[in-house]
Each structure stands twice: as structure tokens, then as C-alpha cells.
Image (cartoon, helix red, strand yellow):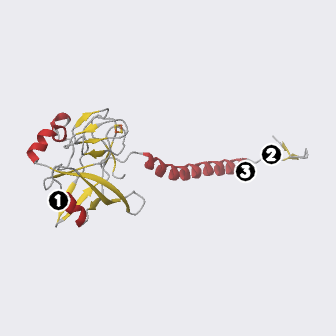
Amino acid sequence: MAIEDAHGAQEPPETPDEISRRTFMVNAVVTMSGIVGLGLVIPIVGGLVPQGSQQKGQWSPLTQAEMADLDAATKTPVKLSFAMTTKDAYLPPQTMQDYVWGIRVNPARFRAARPDLFVGPGDKADVPYPVINMSFVIFSPICPHLGCYFNWNAQANRFLCPCHGSQYNFDGAHLAGPAPRGLDPLPFRERSGIADIMWIRYASTTPDRIVISYKA
Ligand code: FES
């Protein structure tokens, strides 16, 4: 059918070749847009997916002074500030300051005090790494209730969370408040005299330890 232009003049109808060429161009543009769109969407979606347990954590070394503080721990937990190394998939490693809590334990007594860490659902170890190393246990400073940072209260002789009142004893066992589990231990290793910590963030408000991230 003839098409009128803006001035009312009629243009000649398109030939089959012209129609076919136009259809091809439209399809090509739609296809290319889809490919470009996918290229943008995949990294965005990837960034939204929680980082699962397959992702590798980074070991962060304690300094000699931090190690000496930990070594001096007896009946009081030690707050260890350290430079944490984290790595995103698309970025170079980054370093930031954070802290953890370290306690010196008698392994047999600690195992008895925290059976939740050693026997999980299905009689499996609740965490896939040694909890006790060199007679020390390192706790994440993040409350398993909703993620606030808790503190050691010497008068109460327990860890207290300032947000909703969860309480934990020296061994990190849950004593009171809304937290669904005891404190979370972090991987800790010694290599040639250097002690390393790995940061893991576990999901809040669940009795199970589910890794959601290897950074703060
Ligand atoms: S975040 Fe610690 S008790 Fe709620």
C-alpha cells in the first residue's frame, strides 16, 4: 500500500527485497540489544547472588604484638584488632581494619562446653575447619542474632550484645537473649610462627551456620 508523507504526497510501496532487508535489520538490532543486555545483566545478577561456601576466604596474619596479646590470654577473652584482607571477584585484594575475640581453652573442656560446634545436623561437624588451634579459639565479633558487634563485660563475666541483650559465656555458648546460636568460631592457623585468621560472615537469625560472605 502507498504511504503518504508529511505533505500528503504518496510514496511508492516497498518492494519485497526492501521489506526483507528491513526485517533483517530489525531482527539484527533486537538480537544485538539482547546480547549487550545479557552482558550487562550477568555481572549484576552475579553481584547479587550471596557468596557461597565455594568462594575462597583470605588469610590475614596477626602481628607479633597481636599474637603476644593472644598468648597472654588466660581467663579473659582478648580483643584482637587486625588488618583483614578481602577479595571481590573483579577487584584486587583490599585491606581493612576489624577485630575478633580470642580465648585460650582447654580443648576437652571447650568441646564439652560447645557441643554445637562439633556435632551438627546429621552428626557432621558444624564448621568444616578445626575450631581449636594451638589451644586458642577465635570468635567472630558479630552477634548471630542480627549482626551487631558484642563486647566482653568483665563484671558480668560474659559477652553482651548491646542491641537486643543476647548474652554468651566465655566459651561463646548462648546464655540469654534472642540469638539463635552460640558465637561463631573463625578459621585460625599457624604457619612458621605466624598466626593467620580467616574472616567468615555467617547468616543471622538461624540456628545453622550458613556462610554468606568472606568479608565484613
Ligand atoms: S544483634 Fe545481638 S542481640 Fe540482637
| Quadrant where ligand 1 appears | top left
Find the distance from the CA under tag 2 to the CA under tag 3. 10 Å
Q: Which residue is mark 2?
A: 13
Ligand 1 within 8 A of label 2's CB? no
| Quadrant of the rendered image containing residue 176 | top left
Q: Which mark is residue 18?
A: 3
Q: Position of residue 20 (x, y in %)?
A: 68, 48
Ligand 1 within 8 A of label 3's CB? no
In the picture, which quadrant includes the N terminus?
top right
- Between label 1 and label 2, give the one nearer the viewer: 1
Q: Which residue is mark 1?
A: 71
Q: Position of residue 49 (x, y in %)?
A: 41, 45
Tag 3 and tag 1, C-beta contact below 8 Å? no
Image vertical order of residue 186 relative to residue 175, above or below = below
Label 1: how many residues lie within 10 Å, few (<14), some (14-19) or many (20+)? Answer: some
Find the distance from the CA under tag 3 to the CA under tag 1. 83 Å
Indicate left or right for 11 with 111 as reference.
right
Query: Which amino acid, mark 3?
Result: Glu
Q: Which of 6/43 is in front?
A: 43
| Quadrant of the rendered image containing residue 204 | top left
Query: Which amino acid, mark 2?
Result: Pro
Question: Residue at coordinates 18% horizontally, 61% vertically from top-left?
Answer: 190
Query: Which amino acid, mark 1?
Result: Asp
Indicate left or right for 122 with 145 as reference.
left
Q: Which of 137/52 is in front?
A: 137
